[in-house]
Amino acid sequence: MSGLVTILRRDLALASRRGSEASLALMFFVLGTVLFPLGIGPDPNMLARAGAGLLWVMALLASLLSIEKLFQADWEDGSLDLLVLSGLPLAGIVLAKTAAHWLVTSLPMAVASPLLALLLNVDAKGVAALSLALLLGTPTLSLIGAVGAALTVGARRGGVLLTLLVLPLYIPVLIFGAGAAESAVAAQGARAHLLVLAAFLLAALPLCPWAAGAALRQSVE
Amino acid sequence: MHRFANPNRFLRLAAAIVPWSAAAAVLLFGVGLTYALVLSPPDYQQSETVRIMYVHVPAAWMAMGAYAFLALASAVAIVWRHPLADLAAKACAPIGAGFTAIALVTGALWGQPTWGTWWVWDARLTSVLILLFLYLGYMALWNAFDDQSRGARAAGILALVGVVNLPIIKFSVDWWNTLHQPASITRIGTPAIHPAMLTPLLLMAAAYVAFFVTLLLLRTRAEIAARRVRTLQIAHSRGPAAAAMHEPGYS
């Protein structure tokens, strides 16, 4: 357990010292969202309807943008070999690294999302549901992304491949995440959508680190 | 099962099966297509467009069946390091992707006259589209590594992760209120389809299965041959390397 906490703290320290990489995802999220009103026109009604979905797609892409590096840097400098040899459970290592990734990239996005939702004129009832859905859904995205990142460690054109592997698996989370804010605005309550998102997270928590661990093992063999 | 890990035994078995399954596919397609496209009655609501069903439904079944086989073969390859299972899974992927593409295209052609739209973003259609992307991702991952065996194992893990999609496709029509109709064959009790339409549908399904088996065996055979060629090339180049490089036919 303490070993896993050490890995988590190491990844957080690495992210805070590199600085730029951690804020890159957030900048991508904010700037990308700002492009939409300029691209599709500033009509408040249209933005209000599309806002939650836009924010979800942007959060998903920003998460994908940074997940590629989850194991790549460790693989390149050889520390991944040491992590695998350390005797710690591989699934635990994946979980610790994924948690660090989520804390550094997706948590700031969930925190920033109410502000962006207001910019996009999303109904006030939907804003809370949107942030909650992002908090519940983005860990699942990071976990699925970790499987893809582990599979493509050392692959040729790994980034493009990762996109092809991971985006289809993101779709269910996107559907229920964007649906949460929508049904909250429609006064049906977001409870059902949030529960489904929680169910996805609970299913992904044991399964994804296990699959990613298996992928990591064969990548260093 | 390990009896079939011997490529020679597999090749003998495949050589014995292929002529029969190929003949069965040709025969079943001939009878099934005649029955489906000419002899079966038109639907009282959809009239002649219902005939798309005989191509569409078995293709969709086989798209899922091929993925189930792919995942099973990948599991066998990962757990027991079964060398032929890897090759069978690799051989299966393009066939499954083909079936998925057929199901999607015929579905769009069927949707236009009956639903009035080529495509709707409902759960069944979206999950089958995801299935197509899983097949494509599987094939891309196989070829993404310089070391073939790494690509095989990575792709195998992806295939197992993608299994979550199969129940979603199967039950999407029950869980969500969608435009796509729910199952009418595999429900409890009698099928909700008249025997005059059920018979050609089952004939076509059998034809698809025979076609799949034939293609799978042929492709697996080709994969074994390709692996042998590579092994021979490596052995050749390690021998009198300099001489081998100048030999005609060396690539």
Image (cartoon, rainbow, N blue to C red):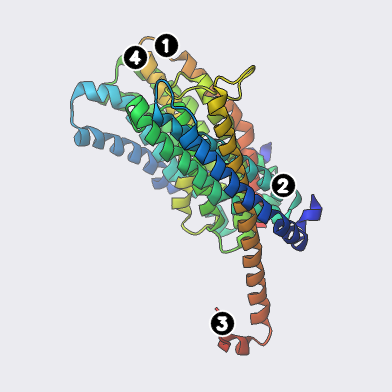
Q: CA distance from mark 2 to mark 4?
A: 48 Å
Q: Are marks 3 and 1 on the same chain?
A: no
Q: Residue A215 in the image: state x and y as whole percent.
A: 62, 48
Comparing marks 2 and 4, which lies closer to the viewer?
Answer: 2
Q: Residue drawn at (64%, 33%), measured in percent from left and top?
A: A206
Q: Are marks 4 and 1 in contact (CB under 8 Å)?
A: no
Q: Amino acid at mark 1?
A: Gly
Comparing marks 3 and 1, which lies closer to the viewer?
Answer: 3
Q: Residue drawn at (19%, 35%), measured in percent from left and top?
A: A38
Q: Residues within 10 Å of mark 2 (few under 14, many from 20)?
A: some
Q: Residue drawn at (54%, 58%), measured in percent from left and top?
A: B143
Chain for disc number 2: B
Q: CA distance from mark 4 to mark 3?
A: 69 Å
Whether residue A147 appears in this view of the structure is: no
Could you say which is closer to the camera, residue B44 or residue B98? Answer: B44
Question: Which mark, residue B76?
Answer: 2
Could you say which is closer to the camera, residue B202 or residue A176? Answer: B202
Q: CA distance from mark 4 to mark 1?
A: 8 Å
Q: Amino acid at mark 2?
A: Val
Q: Residue drawn at (48%, 54%), measured in percent from left and top?
A: A158
Q: Residues within 10 Å of mark 4 (few under 14, many from 20)?
A: many
Q: Which residue is mark 4?
A: A185
Question: Which mark, residue B249?
Answer: 3
Say which element carries label 2.
helix
